[in-house]
Image (spheres, rainbow, N blue to C red):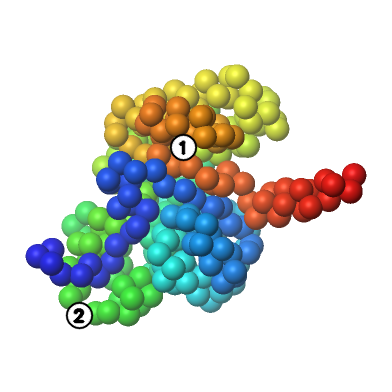
Amino acid sequence: MDGQRALISNPAKEKLKSGEPIFGVNVFEALTPSVVKIAANAGFDMLMVDAEHALNDDSRLSLFLTLVRDNGMAPVVTVIAPERALVSRVLDAGAMGIILSHSETPDQMQDLVRWVKYAPEGVRGLAMGANAGYDGSDVARYCREANDAMLVLPKIESPLGVENAGAIMDVDGVDGVVFGPGDLCAKMGYPGQWEHPEVLTAINSVVDAAITRGLAVEPPAMPTDRAEYNRELIRGARIFGATRQTEYDLYRDALDQVLNPYR
């Protein structure tokens, strides 16, 4: 960019490009400044807003996405379908990436990339609002930088998604893979057994395929100590953190710890 300040950059994607791991937090309802500030102070790189299982007011979501960006993290939104009505609006509101839940076919990912990217790589409609920091000084450069900055992540959470994972990851524009082990284990006949051996085997097959392709990927199970983390990092996993939990889980665990001395 010849020394020019980037009009838009994604701190999480920049770390991935450098081969560094990123750490994410999954949020359902708690779209508050405190959540953003605490996550930023803790050192997280990405806040993942779930728009599949929770409903949030549009204006509240827009403010939250901007706040996440202003605190040096990447806001990424999980949507239920690769449709313009779901993808374009959250990107224009400030999201810096899209996770597609229940990703099962390469056609779905091709559709998603089309709505995420500006022409000529896609057909995203142009607006210069929150997504562009309200800066319309260089539209052409913004579009180029935005296309490079957006994260596109399929979420594999079904046997069909596992079967088609290779073809899904081969779609141009896909940056990595995350998992929905809760749905996957249920669809495999083991509801609630996130770490059933057959479930982990299925996820491992996708992890291996992603690493072979040089794509960012979560480990089959999130590490519980530094040694496990180092093993997964050496293996090639790059997406870690509370990406499969919710603020409900984190709050419940924290309150349990508070009460443990009294039990």
Element type at mark 1: loop
On screen, 33 above or below 159?
below
On screen, 188 above or below 37?
above
Q: Position of residue 248 (x, y in %)?
A: 70, 53
The front one of 135 and 170 is 135
Q: Which residue is mark 1?
A: 218
Query: In which quadrant of the rendered view does residue 139 lie?
Result: bottom left
The front one of 123 and 234 is 234
Residue in the picture at 83% in, 50% down: 259
Extreme residue toward the right, this view: 263
Quadrant containing the C terminus in the rendered view: top right
Quadrant containing the N terminus in the rendered view: bottom left
Q: Which mark is residue 137?
A: 2
Question: Of tags 2 and 1, which is closer to the observer?
Answer: 1
Q: In the rendered structure, which disc, 2 or 1, sits on the residue that comes first in sequence?
A: 2
Residue in the picture at 46% in, 37% down: 218
Q: Decide: few, some or many residues near mark 1? Use Cα within 10 Å; few <14, some 14-19, many ≥20.
A: many
Q: CA distance from mark 2 to mark 1?
A: 37 Å
* 118 left or right, relative to 29: left
- Residue 261 seen in this snapshot: yes
Q: Position of residue 49 (x, y in %)?
A: 53, 58
Query: Amino acid under label 2?
Result: Ser
Residue in the picture at 29% in, 34% down: 214
